Amino acid sequence: MEKRQIGTSDLYVSKMGLGCMSLGTDQHKAQNIIHYALDHGINYLDTADLYDFGANEEIVGNAIRGKRDSVIVATKVGNRWNDVESGWRWDPSKNYIKSAVKDSLHRLKLNYIDLYQAHGGTIEDNIDETIEAFEELKKEGLIRYYGISSIRPNVIKYYLQNSSLVSIMMQYSLLDRRPEEWLSLLAEHNVNVIARGPVAKGLLTERILAKASDKIKEQGYLNYSFAEVKEITDKMKNQFGSTKTVNALALQYILSHPEVSAVIPGASSIEQLQENIEAASATPLESEELAFLKSITKQSKYDQHRD
Protein backbone atom coordinates (compact mmCIF):
# COMPACT_ATOMS: atom_id res chain seq x y z
CA MET A 1 0.00 0.00 0.00
CA GLU A 2 1.19 3.53 -0.82
CA LYS A 3 3.02 5.29 2.01
CA ARG A 4 2.62 8.99 2.73
CA GLN A 5 4.74 11.30 4.83
CA ILE A 6 3.25 12.94 7.92
CA GLY A 7 4.23 16.59 7.80
CA THR A 8 8.01 17.03 7.65
CA SER A 9 8.57 14.01 9.91
CA ASP A 10 10.27 10.79 8.91
CA LEU A 11 7.03 8.92 9.55
CA TYR A 12 5.80 7.34 6.32
CA VAL A 13 2.43 5.74 6.94
CA SER A 14 0.20 3.58 4.79
CA LYS A 15 -2.44 5.83 3.25
CA MET A 16 -4.98 3.77 5.15
CA GLY A 17 -4.26 3.07 8.77
CA LEU A 18 -6.27 1.03 11.23
CA GLY A 19 -8.35 2.95 13.73
CA CYS A 20 -8.25 0.61 16.69
CA MET A 21 -11.15 1.95 18.75
CA SER A 22 -13.61 -0.53 17.21
CA LEU A 23 -11.53 -3.65 17.82
CA GLY A 24 -13.38 -4.64 20.98
CA THR A 25 -11.99 -6.46 23.99
CA ASP A 26 -11.82 -10.00 22.59
CA GLN A 27 -8.05 -10.19 22.41
CA HIS A 28 -7.87 -13.10 19.97
CA LYS A 29 -10.33 -11.50 17.52
CA ALA A 30 -8.71 -8.08 17.81
CA GLN A 31 -5.22 -9.45 17.24
CA ASN A 32 -6.41 -11.33 14.16
CA ILE A 33 -7.73 -8.05 12.72
CA ILE A 34 -4.45 -6.25 13.47
CA HIS A 35 -2.37 -9.05 11.98
CA TYR A 36 -4.54 -9.08 8.84
CA ALA A 37 -3.98 -5.33 8.51
CA LEU A 38 -0.22 -5.67 8.88
CA ASP A 39 -0.12 -8.56 6.43
CA HIS A 40 -1.94 -6.46 3.81
CA GLY A 41 0.28 -3.41 3.76
CA ILE A 42 -1.03 -1.34 6.67
CA ASN A 43 1.78 -0.08 8.89
CA TYR A 44 -0.09 2.57 10.89
CA LEU A 45 -2.12 1.74 14.01
CA ASP A 46 -4.02 4.44 15.88
CA THR A 47 -5.15 3.84 19.46
CA ALA A 48 -5.69 5.92 22.62
CA ASP A 49 -5.24 5.42 26.33
CA LEU A 50 -8.97 6.06 26.78
CA TYR A 51 -10.15 3.25 24.51
CA ASP A 52 -11.56 0.55 26.75
CA PHE A 53 -9.67 2.27 29.58
CA GLY A 54 -6.24 1.06 28.54
CA ALA A 55 -7.21 -2.37 27.26
CA ASN A 56 -6.97 -1.27 23.63
CA GLU A 57 -3.36 -0.20 24.04
CA GLU A 58 -2.59 -3.56 25.66
CA ILE A 59 -4.16 -5.42 22.74
CA VAL A 60 -2.17 -3.37 20.22
CA GLY A 61 1.02 -3.92 22.19
CA ASN A 62 0.53 -7.68 22.31
CA ALA A 63 -0.35 -7.84 18.60
CA ILE A 64 2.77 -6.05 17.39
CA ARG A 65 5.24 -7.91 19.56
CA GLY A 66 8.20 -8.80 17.37
CA LYS A 67 7.00 -6.44 14.63
CA ARG A 68 8.01 -3.09 16.15
CA ASP A 69 10.35 -1.98 13.39
CA SER A 70 7.65 -2.28 10.73
CA VAL A 71 4.81 -0.57 12.62
CA ILE A 72 4.08 3.09 13.30
CA VAL A 73 2.08 3.42 16.50
CA ALA A 74 -0.01 6.47 17.37
CA THR A 75 -1.82 6.93 20.65
CA LYS A 76 -3.50 9.79 22.49
CA VAL A 77 -3.49 11.46 25.89
CA GLY A 78 -5.50 13.95 27.92
CA ASN A 79 -8.70 12.13 28.83
CA ARG A 80 -7.89 11.15 32.40
CA TRP A 81 -9.87 8.16 33.60
CA ASN A 82 -7.78 6.70 36.42
CA ASP A 83 -8.85 9.07 39.20
CA VAL A 84 -12.62 9.28 38.74
CA GLU A 85 -15.31 6.78 39.65
CA SER A 86 -16.82 6.64 36.18
CA GLY A 87 -16.07 8.20 32.81
CA TRP A 88 -13.15 10.57 32.48
CA ARG A 89 -12.07 14.18 32.80
CA TRP A 90 -9.91 16.36 30.60
CA ASP A 91 -6.41 16.97 31.89
CA PRO A 92 -3.86 18.44 29.45
CA SER A 93 -1.41 19.38 32.20
CA LYS A 94 2.30 18.77 31.79
CA ASN A 95 2.49 16.60 34.89
CA TYR A 96 -0.31 14.34 33.72
CA ILE A 97 0.98 13.98 30.15
CA LYS A 98 4.47 13.07 31.35
CA SER A 99 3.00 10.50 33.71
CA ALA A 100 0.43 9.11 31.26
CA VAL A 101 2.99 8.50 28.53
CA LYS A 102 4.79 6.03 30.78
CA ASP A 103 1.55 4.17 31.41
CA SER A 104 0.86 4.02 27.68
CA LEU A 105 4.37 2.77 26.96
CA HIS A 106 3.92 0.06 29.58
CA ARG A 107 0.60 -1.08 28.13
CA LEU A 108 1.94 -0.95 24.57
CA LYS A 109 5.17 -2.69 25.65
CA LEU A 110 7.19 -0.09 23.75
CA ASN A 111 10.21 2.07 24.45
CA TYR A 112 8.84 4.98 22.45
CA ILE A 113 5.66 6.15 20.72
CA ASP A 114 5.88 7.28 17.10
CA LEU A 115 3.05 9.83 17.21
CA TYR A 116 1.60 11.12 20.49
CA GLN A 117 -1.57 13.17 20.20
CA ALA A 118 -3.54 15.45 22.48
CA HIS A 119 -6.97 13.83 22.55
CA GLY A 120 -9.00 17.04 22.37
CA GLY A 121 -8.63 20.41 24.04
CA THR A 122 -10.02 23.94 24.13
CA ILE A 123 -8.47 27.37 23.77
CA GLU A 124 -8.97 27.82 27.54
CA ASP A 125 -6.35 25.13 28.20
CA ASN A 126 -2.81 26.09 29.08
CA ILE A 127 -1.72 24.98 25.62
CA ASP A 128 1.83 26.23 26.09
CA GLU A 129 2.20 23.81 28.99
CA THR A 130 0.89 20.96 26.86
CA ILE A 131 3.32 21.83 24.09
CA GLU A 132 6.17 22.01 26.59
CA ALA A 133 5.32 18.50 27.79
CA PHE A 134 5.38 17.13 24.25
CA GLU A 135 8.67 18.87 23.45
CA GLU A 136 10.28 17.45 26.58
CA LEU A 137 9.05 13.96 25.74
CA LYS A 138 10.65 14.29 22.30
CA LYS A 139 13.98 15.27 23.85
CA GLU A 140 13.73 12.37 26.27
CA GLY A 141 13.16 9.96 23.40
CA LEU A 142 9.80 8.73 24.70
CA ILE A 143 7.95 10.04 21.66
CA ARG A 144 9.17 10.79 18.15
CA TYR A 145 6.56 13.35 17.09
CA TYR A 146 3.33 14.83 18.35
CA GLY A 147 0.02 16.07 17.01
CA ILE A 148 -3.49 16.86 18.15
CA SER A 149 -6.90 15.35 17.61
CA SER A 150 -9.16 18.37 17.35
CA ILE A 151 -11.82 19.94 15.16
CA ARG A 152 -11.75 23.34 16.91
CA PRO A 153 -10.43 26.11 14.65
CA ASN A 154 -9.02 28.31 17.41
CA VAL A 155 -7.16 25.37 18.96
CA ILE A 156 -5.79 24.29 15.58
CA LYS A 157 -4.56 27.80 14.77
CA TYR A 158 -2.83 28.14 18.14
CA TYR A 159 -0.92 24.90 17.72
CA LEU A 160 0.07 25.79 14.16
CA GLN A 161 1.51 29.08 15.32
CA ASN A 162 3.19 27.92 18.53
CA SER A 163 4.31 24.31 18.24
CA SER A 164 6.18 21.82 16.07
CA LEU A 165 3.28 19.41 15.69
CA VAL A 166 3.22 17.33 12.52
CA SER A 167 -0.40 16.21 12.31
CA ILE A 168 -3.98 17.07 13.14
CA MET A 169 -6.56 14.34 13.38
CA MET A 170 -9.96 15.53 12.23
CA GLN A 171 -13.27 13.90 11.44
CA TYR A 172 -13.41 14.14 7.67
CA SER A 173 -15.71 12.48 5.17
CA LEU A 174 -17.91 13.29 2.20
CA LEU A 175 -20.65 13.92 4.76
CA ASP A 176 -18.39 16.13 6.87
CA ARG A 177 -16.28 18.34 4.64
CA ARG A 178 -15.66 20.99 7.29
CA PRO A 179 -11.89 20.34 7.46
CA GLU A 180 -11.49 21.55 3.87
CA GLU A 181 -11.61 25.12 5.13
CA TRP A 182 -8.23 24.54 6.79
CA LEU A 183 -6.32 22.45 4.27
CA SER A 184 -4.46 25.35 2.64
CA LEU A 185 -3.40 26.73 6.03
CA LEU A 186 -2.16 23.31 7.12
CA ALA A 187 -0.17 23.04 3.89
CA GLU A 188 1.49 26.38 4.63
CA HIS A 189 2.67 24.97 7.97
CA ASN A 190 3.66 21.54 6.56
CA VAL A 191 1.15 19.83 8.82
CA ASN A 192 -0.95 16.92 7.60
CA VAL A 193 -4.40 15.56 8.33
CA ILE A 194 -5.15 12.14 9.76
CA ALA A 195 -8.77 11.59 8.72
CA ARG A 196 -10.94 9.75 11.20
CA GLY A 197 -14.53 8.79 10.45
CA PRO A 198 -13.97 8.72 6.67
CA VAL A 199 -16.97 6.45 6.08
CA ALA A 200 -19.30 8.41 8.36
CA LYS A 201 -20.24 5.69 10.86
CA GLY A 202 -20.65 3.17 8.06
CA LEU A 203 -23.09 5.26 6.04
CA LEU A 204 -20.58 5.38 3.18
CA THR A 205 -19.80 1.67 3.03
CA GLU A 206 -21.30 -1.26 1.21
CA ARG A 207 -23.56 -2.04 4.14
CA ILE A 208 -24.74 1.54 3.63
CA LEU A 209 -28.08 2.46 5.18
CA ALA A 210 -29.52 -0.95 5.97
CA LYS A 211 -27.63 -1.13 9.26
CA ALA A 212 -27.90 2.53 10.23
CA SER A 213 -28.81 3.07 13.85
CA ASP A 214 -32.29 4.15 14.87
CA LYS A 215 -30.80 7.44 16.07
CA ILE A 216 -29.35 8.22 12.65
CA LYS A 217 -32.61 7.22 10.94
CA GLU A 218 -34.50 9.62 13.19
CA GLN A 219 -31.99 12.46 13.54
CA GLY A 220 -29.80 12.11 10.48
CA TYR A 221 -26.03 12.63 10.40
CA LEU A 222 -24.64 16.05 11.25
CA ASN A 223 -26.47 18.51 8.96
CA TYR A 224 -27.93 15.80 6.72
CA SER A 225 -31.29 14.16 7.22
CA PHE A 226 -31.44 10.41 6.75
CA ALA A 227 -33.34 10.97 3.49
CA GLU A 228 -30.56 13.27 2.25
CA VAL A 229 -27.92 10.66 3.03
CA LYS A 230 -29.88 8.08 1.07
CA GLU A 231 -30.27 10.49 -1.83
CA ILE A 232 -26.50 11.10 -1.91
CA THR A 233 -25.60 7.41 -1.88
CA ASP A 234 -28.21 6.73 -4.58
CA LYS A 235 -26.64 9.44 -6.76
CA MET A 236 -23.21 7.95 -6.19
CA LYS A 237 -24.38 4.49 -7.23
CA ASN A 238 -26.27 5.83 -10.26
CA GLN A 239 -23.28 7.88 -11.41
CA PHE A 240 -20.59 5.26 -10.95
CA GLY A 241 -22.54 2.02 -11.23
CA SER A 242 -20.34 -0.98 -10.51
CA THR A 243 -17.08 0.76 -11.43
CA LYS A 244 -16.49 2.13 -7.93
CA THR A 245 -18.13 1.21 -4.65
CA VAL A 246 -19.55 3.85 -2.33
CA ASN A 247 -16.79 2.95 0.13
CA ALA A 248 -14.10 3.45 -2.50
CA LEU A 249 -15.55 6.81 -3.50
CA ALA A 250 -15.62 7.88 0.15
CA LEU A 251 -12.00 6.97 0.86
CA GLN A 252 -10.59 8.07 -2.49
CA TYR A 253 -12.26 11.47 -2.13
CA ILE A 254 -10.45 12.10 1.16
CA LEU A 255 -7.18 10.67 -0.16
CA SER A 256 -7.32 12.95 -3.20
CA HIS A 257 -6.23 15.83 -0.97
CA PRO A 258 -2.42 15.99 -0.66
CA GLU A 259 -2.76 17.40 2.85
CA VAL A 260 -4.17 14.05 4.03
CA SER A 261 -1.55 11.54 5.14
CA ALA A 262 -3.95 8.74 5.98
CA VAL A 263 -7.54 7.74 6.46
CA ILE A 264 -8.14 5.57 9.51
CA PRO A 265 -11.47 3.76 9.33
CA GLY A 266 -12.14 1.39 12.17
CA ALA A 267 -12.94 -2.28 11.80
CA SER A 268 -14.63 -4.74 14.10
CA SER A 269 -14.18 -7.67 11.70
CA ILE A 270 -11.74 -8.86 9.06
CA GLU A 271 -14.54 -8.53 6.49
CA GLN A 272 -14.90 -4.82 7.26
CA LEU A 273 -11.16 -4.35 7.15
CA GLN A 274 -10.87 -6.16 3.83
CA GLU A 275 -13.58 -3.96 2.33
CA ASN A 276 -11.76 -0.84 3.49
CA ILE A 277 -8.40 -2.06 2.15
CA GLU A 278 -9.97 -2.68 -1.26
CA ALA A 279 -11.54 0.79 -1.18
CA ALA A 280 -8.27 2.49 -0.22
CA SER A 281 -6.48 0.57 -2.98
CA ALA A 282 -8.98 1.54 -5.68
CA THR A 283 -8.09 3.77 -8.63
CA PRO A 284 -7.73 7.44 -7.61
CA LEU A 285 -10.55 9.72 -8.68
CA GLU A 286 -10.36 11.96 -11.74
CA SER A 287 -11.01 15.69 -11.43
CA GLU A 288 -14.53 15.42 -12.88
CA GLU A 289 -15.37 12.63 -10.46
CA LEU A 290 -14.20 14.76 -7.53
CA ALA A 291 -16.26 17.66 -8.83
CA PHE A 292 -19.36 15.47 -8.98
CA LEU A 293 -18.93 14.31 -5.38
CA LYS A 294 -18.50 17.91 -4.24
CA SER A 295 -21.62 18.92 -6.13
CA ILE A 296 -23.87 16.46 -4.31
CA THR A 297 -22.52 17.13 -0.80
CA LYS A 298 -22.37 20.17 1.46
CA GLN A 299 -19.37 22.38 2.17
CA SER A 300 -19.95 23.28 5.81
CA LYS A 301 -17.86 25.22 8.31
CA TYR A 302 -17.29 24.89 12.01
CA ASP A 303 -19.51 27.52 13.61
CA GLN A 304 -18.12 27.27 17.13
CA HIS A 305 -14.69 27.71 18.70
CA ARG A 306 -13.67 30.42 16.27
CA ASP A 307 -11.78 33.65 16.86
Image (cartoon, rainbow, N blue to C red):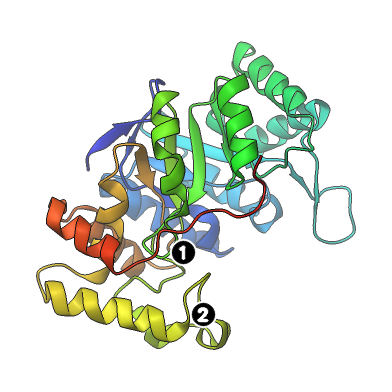
Q: Quadrant of residue 189?
A: top left
Find out whether the residues at labels 2 and 1 contact each other: C-beta distance under 8 Å. Answer: no
Q: Is residue 166 above or below residue 212?
A: above
Query: How many residues crowd around disc 2 within 10 Å: few (fewer than 14), some, or many (20 or more)?
Result: some
Q: How far from the left and from the top, in percent, is residue 10?
A: 38, 20
Q: How far from the left and from the top, in percent, is residue 94?
A: 79, 26
Query: How many residues crowd around disc 1 within 10 Å: few (fewer than 14), some, or many (20 or more)?
Result: some
Q: Is residue 55 above or below residue 174?
A: above
Instruction: Determine the residue positioned at 47% across, 38% down.
Output: 65
Q: Is residue 108 visible?
A: no
Q: Locate the C terminus by quadrant.
A: top right
- What residue would you read off at disc 2? 220
The residue most toward the front is 307
Q: Is residue 205 above or below residue 145?
A: below
For this rendering, which residue is in front, 29 or 132?
Answer: 132
Q: Quadrant of residue 5?
A: top left
- What residue would you read off at disc 1? 29
Instruction: Determine the residue positioned at 66% across, 45% down.
Output: 120
Name the amino acid type tagged 1: Lys
Q: Locate the N terminus by quadrant.
A: top left
Mark 2 / mark 1, whichever is N-terminal: 1
Name the amino acid type tagged 2: Gly
Q: How far from the left and from the top, in percent, is residue 132?
A: 71, 19
The residue most toward the top is 139
